[in-house]
Image: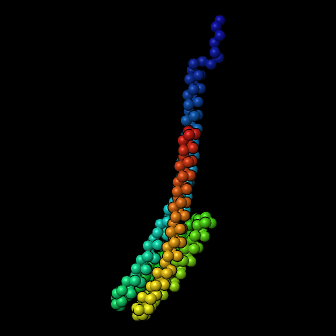
Amino acid sequence: MTNKSSITVSRRLGLGVSLLIALTLVVAVLGFFSARQNESVLKGINEGSVKPLALVGEMNYLITRNRILVTDVAMHAVPDVIARRSKEYAANKARIEALWTQYMQAPMGEAEKALAREVDTARRALTEQGLDATMALEQAGKIEEGWHQLDVVSKLNPAYTKSMDTLIAQQVQSAQDGYQEALTAGQRMDLII
């Protein structure tokens, strides 16, 4: 009698197919885990960097626009220009406050919170001591004094601009770090799979 293996060909094929199915399931689970992890990282980048960047970008535009408005009133000091520009200035100011409130509700680390406080201090000084004061003088018909007040705006603006640029750079760096983290995790998972 010959020594036969206890496993028949059909059993071997069955075990082989079962092993392939098990490996396919393991790869599918790892792929699903990787996709969920990347989704989480991308959501964090979106909520923590992209949306806040859009908010401060619009806010920065509106503050610049308000600088232009007070300068335009000084240059074209006629009642209809003063009225139109004052109305737009007030709407922009209200929108800036709403954007800032929304921005401060976004998730942020301690470094970003500290930078946000610097921006807020510089923004308030520029708005209250510079832009608001200039617009109030111009609305009162004190155009010459408004021109002199524009010097205050020019002195306050660099602190605001510097703090805002630093905050934006921090957010961009945060987004880049999140992207690198997701890329590295994805590459690791690719190696595993």
Tell me if I can see residue 19 in this picture.
yes
Question: Which residue does the image show at 47% across and 82% down from the upper left?
Answer: 153
The x, y position of residue 35, in whole percent, is 54, 48
Q: Position of residue 28 (x, y in %)?
A: 55, 40
* Percent x, y of residue 60: 46, 72
Q: In this view, does 14 lie to the left or right of 57?
A: right
Report the quarter where the C terminus lies: top right
Q: Residue at x 58, y 34 (%)?
A: 22
In the depicted structure, whether residue 66 falls above or below residue 40: below
- In the displayed structure image, the side of residue 117 where residue 79 appears, left or right: left
Quadrant showing the N terminus: top right
Q: In this view, does 67 lie to the left or right of 172?
A: left
Residue 51, x across and y down, in percent: 50, 64
Is 59 situated left or right of 77 in this image? right
In front here: 180 or 96?
Answer: 180
Q: Which of 87 and 110 is in front in this view?
A: 110
Residue 112 placement: quadrant:
bottom right
Closer to the camera in the image, 22 or 97 = 97
Q: Which residue is drawn at 57% across and 71% down?
A: 116
The single residue placed furthest to the bottom in the displayed view is 141
Quadrant hosting residue 144: bottom left
Look at 57% across and 26% down and name the residue there. 16
Placement of 21 over or under 127, stated as above or below: above
